[in-house]
Image (tube, helix red, strand yellow):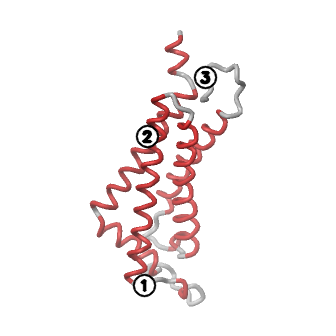
């Protein structure tokens, strides 16, 4: 019965979601590094706003300087890599039974939400009008990522409000 209780516990659910999230964002990072040119083109077109409606009222926001585009892209990749490391450390902490698992998973999902919600949805989608592009529109993928991060954040923070007498609590 203890095994069944553990298999159905919130602790295991959050640990598995941490593992899945670390794997997913790690693969995103790997893809951005190994297929640098394709993904650089995506960032370049979003920054340049060259496939939007090209309204003169917003085109002043466009960034076409290759150095600035490269800096932006490298910062994205670096943030993804750091998020992968934090979530992976969170998984290791969960597996070791450490209280750090909760904090590291929470931080990793917050970082993921910041990148995909703040970076891609807010800045890419709205500032650079990415929603107007039929070819270079990453809003669906960004929404997918912020949803995963949000579910993780909700679960890990709900676990903190559980009764101390609950067997499946996370701390």
Residue at the image position 58 percent from the left and 72 percent from the top: 126
> Residue tagged by mark 1?
64
> Residue tagged by mark 2?
20
Q: Nearer the viewer, residue 101 or 33?
A: 101
Image location of residue 24, percent across then percent down = 41, 47
Measure the alpha-carbon separation of dots 3 and 1: 52 Å
Dot 3 falls on a residue whose secondary structure is: loop
Decide which of tag 1 and tag 2 comes sooner along the chain.
Answer: 2
Residue at the image position 55 percent from the left and 37 percent from the top: 100
Measure the alpha-carbon separation of dots 2 and 3: 20 Å
- Seen in the image, is 153 located left or right of residue 50? right
- Seen in the image, is 109 located left or right of residue 37? right
Decide which of tag 2 and tag 3 comes sooner along the chain.
Answer: 2
Decide which of tag 3 and tag 1 comes sooner along the chain.
Answer: 1
Location of the C terminus (image quadrant): top right
Dot 1 falls on a residue whose secondary structure is: loop
Image location of residue 59, percent across then percent down = 53, 86
Dot 2 falls on a residue whose secondary structure is: helix
Image location of residue 20, percent across then percent down = 43, 40
> Residue tagged by mark 3?
168
């Amino acid at each position: 019965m203890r095994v069944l209780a553990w298999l159905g516990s919130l602790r295991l659910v959050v640990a598995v979601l941490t593992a899945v999230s670390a794997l997913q964002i790690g693969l995103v990072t790997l893809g951005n590094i190994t297929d640098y040119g394709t993904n650089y083109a995506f960032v370049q077109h979003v920054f340049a706003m060259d496939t939007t409606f090209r309204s003169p009222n917003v085109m002043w926001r466009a960034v076409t300087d290759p150095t600035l585009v490269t800096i932006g892209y490298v910062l994205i990749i670096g943030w993804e890599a750091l998020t992968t490391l934090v979530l992976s450390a969170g998984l290791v902490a969960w597996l070791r039974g450490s209280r750090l698992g909760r904090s590291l998973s929470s931080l990793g999902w917050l970082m993921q939400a910041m990148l995909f919600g703040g970076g891609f949805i807010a800045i890419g989608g709205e500032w650079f009008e990415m929603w107007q592009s039929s070819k270079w529109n990453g809003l669906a993928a960004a929404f997918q990522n912020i949803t995963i991060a949000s579910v993780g954040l909700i679960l890990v923070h709900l676990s903190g409000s559980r009764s101390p007498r609950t067997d499946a609590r996370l701390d």
